[in-house]
Image: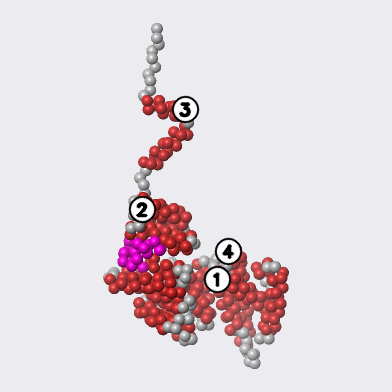
Amino acid sequence: MMGKSRPQPNGKDARSRRLSKKNPDKVLSARLRSKKSSQPKESVEELLAKGSVLLQTSQPDEALSCASRALSNLRSEDAHSTARALPTLLLLAEIQLELGDADAARNAFVQAVHLDPRGLIDDSLGGGAEKFLWLAQLSEEGGHDSVSWFEKGITVLRNDLASKRDREVQAQKRRKLAAALCGVVEIYMTDLSWEPDAESRCESLITEAMLVAPESPETLQTLANVRISQTRVEEARKVLADSIELWKDLPAGDDSVPEFPARISLSRLLMEVEMEDDAMGVLERLVEEDDTSVEVWYLGGWCMYLTAERRSPKKDTNWKASDDVEEGIRKASLISSRDWLINSLRLYELQDYEDERLRDHARELVRDLNSVLGDNQEDPSDEDDDAEEEGWHSDGDDEDQAMEGT
C-alpha cells in the first residue's frame, strides 16, 4: 500500500526555500535592493534644500554629495543645460568655495553664466548678479578681466534697483551695488593703479557708492582708503571713525557688522593713519570671535609696538614726574606686543601659513622686543636653525645699539 503523498509546495515557495538553503546572503541582498528601489527618488528641490542645510551646518562634503546628485538628476531629465540648473550650479560653486577648490567653483559659475548671460533671470531662480560678482573675485587674470565681470554685475544691480519696489529688497541691492563699486575701486588702486585715469575712476566710483549706500561701513572704509592714497589723512580719519561708529556696539552676528576680512583691512587702515587705539579695539574683538587667525595676532602685536614707539621719550626734553607713568605704559605696550607676536608665530607654524613676509617681520619685531625686555623662553623663533639664529643675533646687535641711542 502506497503511503499518503506529501503536499507539494507551490513553485514560488519552493524557489524561496531553495535559495534560502543555498545562499541566505543573496536572498537578503535581493530583498534590500528591492526595498531600496521601491523608495521614492529624492527630487532636485529636496536635494538642494538638504545640501543647503548641510553647508550651513559646516558639512560641505555631505553638501557636495547632495548637489552633485541634484545635477545628476537634472542630466537624467535632460534639464542640466536649462535655466532650471541655475540654483544647483550656484550651490555647487558655493560648496566648492567652502572646500577651497576655486577652480571648480569658477567652472560652476561660468556654466551659470552660459545659462543666464545677462543676469535677467530672477535671483530666486538662481539668476541675477551673484555669479558675475563671484567671477570678478575669482578671476585668474585680475585687472581688466575682474573689472569686466564686476561691470556685468553692476549693470544687473542697477537695473534691479530701477525695477524692484520692495524696500528690503532695494536695501539689499544697494549694499551689493556699493560693494561691487568698491571692488572696482580696489582694483584701480592696486592692479590698475598705473592707468592714467585710475584716480578719476576711483573718485567717480566711490561717489556713486556713497550715493547708493552712504551708511555702509565697507563703503566708508573704501572712501577712507581713497583719501589716504590722496594724502588727505584728516578726512580719512574722520571717515574711518564714522565707519566704526556704525557697528561697534552691535553683536557679532548682526548683518551690519562688516565681515571678518573687511575688519582686518580696517585695522590696517587705522594703523596707517595712526589711530592705534581704535585699531586695537577692532583686533581684540576679532580675536574674541576667532583666536586662530595668524594675521590678527600679528597685526595686534605690530599695533602695540607702534603704540609703544609713539610713547618713546623725545630727545633733549627735561624729565617730568609724568615721564615715569608714560614709561610704565610704554613697557606694558611692549610686553603686550611681544605676547601677540609670539602667538602669531606659534599659529604660523601650526597652520603651515604661507606669508613669509609676515613671518619675517614678526620675527624681526620679537628680536627688537627681546633686546629691550630680555629674552622670552616661549619665543617660537628660538627653534630655527643655528645659522639663521646667528644671523638674527648679529642683526639684533645693531638694533640694540639703535634702541640704546634713543
Residue 7 point in image, percent of width and height: 37, 18
Q: Is residue 196 above or below residue 95?
A: below
Q: Residue at x 38, y 75 (%)?
A: 178
Label 1 amino acid?
A: Glu
Q: Amino acid at mark 3?
A: Lys
For the residues labelled 2 and 3, the Cα–Cα distance comes to 43 Å
Q: Nearer the viewer, residue 284 or 341?
A: 341
Residue at 35% over, 45% down = 40
Nearer the observer: mark 1 or 2; the answer is 2
Q: Are marks 2 and 4 in contact (CB under 8 Å)?
A: no
Q: Which mark is residue 21?
A: 3
Residue 381 is drawn in which quadrant? Answer: bottom right
For label 4, the crowd category at 10 Å Cα-Cα, with few meaning under 14, some 14 to 19 and many 20 or more, is few
Q: Amino acid at mark 4?
A: Gln
Dot 1 or dot 2, earlier in sequence:
2
Of the two numbered discs 3 and 1 in the rendering, the one whose residue sits closer to the viewer: 3
Q: Which mark is residue 74?
A: 2
